Every structure is written in C-alpha cells, then in structure tokens.
Image: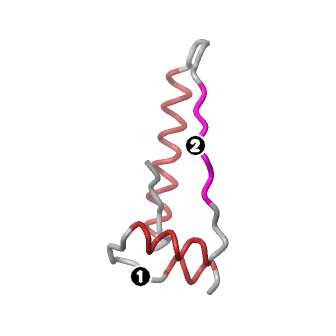
Amino acid sequence: MTKQQVLTRGRGYHISRNTAAKLLARASYRRRSLRKALITGDVDLHERDQQFQLIATLRRQARARGVPVLCVG
C-alpha cells in the first residue's frame, strides 16, 4: 500500500487509534517524540500569530483539495 493510498483510504470514516497506527505504519510513517522547550526569552506575539494563521490557511487549502489533515494533540 502506498502512502497516498493510506491517506485517501477510509476518507470520511472514524477509525480507532489502533487502526490509524497500523495504516500509518504500513505506509512507513514513524512516531516521533514530542519535544517542547521552555520559552525563556521574549516572544513576538505578532510573529506567533502569523505562524498560526499560516497553519490555518494551509489546513483550509488542503481540505478544499480533498487532502486529509491530521491533527496531533
């Protein structure tokens, strides 16, 4: 199964976490550990907002083209 087949397979259906993990593993996706660093300096809130706006725009564009969007949280 190709990565594209995994991404388009089951579109519109809710699947369990285990099923998603198996499909992603078959497509050679690997889990990465989350690494979060403490912010110790000043944060440019405008720049941070721009990053989130860009992410939101990219998500909307992907969904409009029918490309699945994965949310990790």
Mark 1 touches mark 2? (CB < 8 Å): no
Q: Where does residue 9 sit, x and y in percent of width and height? A: 47, 83
Give the quarter of the image for residue 71: bottom left
Give residue 34's mark. Answer: 2
Mark sitting earlier along the chain (1/2): 1
Mark 1 residue element? loop
Q: Position of residue 20 (x, y in %)?
A: 46, 71
User: Is residue 58 positioned above or below 14 on the image?
Assistant: above
Q: Nearer the viewer, mark 1 or mark 2?
A: 2
Report how far apart the C-alphas of labels 1 and 2 lie in the structure.
27 Å
Q: Residue furthest front?
A: 18
Asked if residue 56 is positioned above or below residue 41 in the image, the reply reads: below
Q: Number of labelled discs?
A: 2
Q: Is residue 32 magenta?
A: yes
Magenta stretch bounds: 31-37
**Relative to 61, residue 33 above or below:** above
Number of other residues with Cα within 10 Å of mark 1, as a class: few under 14, some 14 to 19, many 20 or more: few
User: Nearest the camera: 14 or 52?
Assistant: 14
Give residue 36's position: percent from left, percent from top: 58, 33
The image quadrant of residue 14 is: bottom left
Q: Residue at x 46, y 74 (%)?
A: 66
Q: Secondary structure at mark 2?
A: loop
Say which residue label 1 marks: 10
Residue at x 51%, y 47% (from the top left corner): 55
Question: Quick one: quadrant of the N terminus?
Answer: bottom right
**In this rendering, position of residue 48 left or right of residue 60:** right
Q: Main secondary structure of the magenta part?
A: loop
Name the residue nearer the viewer: 49 or 26: 26
Q: Is residue 22 left or right of residue 19?
A: right
Q: Amino acid at mark 2?
A: Leu
The three-letter code of the residue at mark 1 reads: Gly
